[in-house]
Image: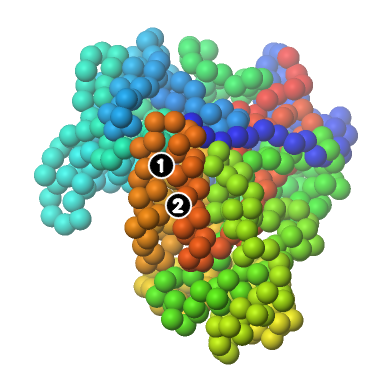
Amino acid sequence: MKSTTSRIAVGIVAAAACATMLTGCLGQTADAGDGKTSFVAVNNGEIGRITGAQNPGSQIAMALCEPLTGIEEDGKVFMRGAESLESEDQVHWTVKVADGHTFSDGTPITAKTYVDTFNFVGAGKNGMPSNYAYGPIKGYDELNPAEGEATATEFSGIRLEDEHTFTIEMKTPNNDVPYILSQLAFCPMPESAFADPVAYDKKPIGNGVYTLEKLDPQVEAVLKRDPKYKGWVPKGAADQITFRVYTDTNTAYQDVVAGNADVLRSLPPGLIAQGRNSLGEKGLTAIDRNTLETYFTWPTYLDKTYPLEVRQAFSMIVDRASISKDLFKDATVPAGSLMPNSVSAYREDACGQYCTFDPAAAKALIAKSGFTGSIPLNYSSENTTDAATALAVSNSAKEIGLEVEPKPVPSAALSETINSYKLDGPVIQLWGSSFPAASEWIASVYVDANYRLQYTDAEGQAAVDGALAAPTQEESDALWQKAEDRILADQVIQPLYQQVMYIAHTECVTPHAAGGDMQIYRTQVTCGK
């Protein structure tokens, strides 16, 4: 329904490393002698969980799970565990489950499998970490009351029709359902998992391309291709993937350079320049569609302190192009939209003049507002990227006589301040999406729990509701853009930059993404066999 993604190859030395090292390089791992391919991927952090909400085990879970739908590199939806997914009103959805698919232990997967899974995960009493994702489905509130006991044991909006068919009724029209069902939260679980989901998490029975052969949470997880799997297999998929645990990104990066590991997802901005020098065009890939964006946010309870002209002026003294090019060495790209370029409703310059560096116009706006105070710019003290950004903005503001005070705050304290509606100025915030849809970026602004802006706008909210109910992509995008225009006019959230995801890898693999999100199990093996 939305968005795009592909790859840009940017990176050399790994080939020499593979020529001399006998561990970690494609075609040279322990099972290379039998003609099978394998690679070592960096797992950032201990594998505390595999199933459930996003966590350090999520990349493993993606390889074990075949969701009902999948996302192409260009962001389009395709059918995986579902044979078809249809709706005439964006409220009532009919799902036909593909015939003959099974879990890795041979247990058949039917429509009932999904209905039982959804009812189990969606019930708050079961304490499943993915429960939140079921919020848009009719009956969720009865299963998850804010107070007291649940008044239902199953979703009123989910009904089993026959062995291969079930229906989903949403609370309101929602044309994002094909994207929603691609998430890990909706992976099917066998009936045996419900008795002890904690134990199941340690040894999940998947239904995807790979099976979990070994798990040592502090060391590694080993996955092997399931020969019985009947669904979609990524092009050039390896026969085995080893997810090796790293707690230090610098160490992981050095292992990729040395050929001891093959794939490092999301190289930190501080290592990108080194990666260009060490890995060259064949070992550093930039995903050219973005799923992370950094903003300045201004909660509306500060409107009297910082009126619209002040907020506009603040945005106009930010040299976004210089920050991305000179400060972050193209690890980011300037943002002129509240949406990233992975979303079909994206417009490069939606923000217009107020995201354009113009100190003279900013100075005139400050004079017009009569503002004479200073602006504390809040950010996490643990985030060196935000610290560099805040300093750059402060220096730029001085040129027009405006005082912007960088204000580092420990992450926990900053979160508490934001959640308690006690900010004294704007804050630098990062937002990412679960799938490449405009709702993740525009509708999210109207949900107070996301940014704590206390922001409401009837016309913008109506546009959001219309966009989710629109029968065509074109109609939907036009309404998302209208809602975006309303938010930008109020200057409660200002785009700063989109983060470019760089993948460090050895020459024998090519990374692939789903709508801008690099997924390790989709890595294409280009050597071996």
Mark pair 1, 2: CA separation: 9 Å
Q: Quadrant of the C terminus?
A: top right
Q: Is residue 322 left or right of residue 116?
A: right
Determine if residue 283 is in view.
no
Amino acid at dot 1: Ala
Q: Is residue 12 above or below residue 400?
A: above
Q: Is residue 163 left or right of residue 429?
A: left
Residue shown at 85% from the left, 41% from the top: 280
Reading the image, the residue beneath label 2 is 483
Q: Position of residue 260 (x, y in %)?
A: 74, 38
Answer few, some or many: residues within 10 Å of disc 1's Cα (few below 14, many 20 plus, some between 14 and 19).
many
Answer few, some or many: residues within 10 Å of disc 2's Cα (few below 14, many 20 plus, some between 14 and 19).
many
Q: Position of residue 158 (x, y in %)?
A: 23, 30
Reading the image, the residue beneath label 1 is 467
Residue lying farthest bottom?
A: 372
Q: Position of residue 477 (x, y in %)?
A: 49, 40
Residue shown at 47% from the left, 82% from the top: 305
Amino acid at dot 2: Ala
Q: Is residue 99 left or right of residue 407?
A: left
Along the polypeptide, which appears first: circle 1 or circle 2?
1
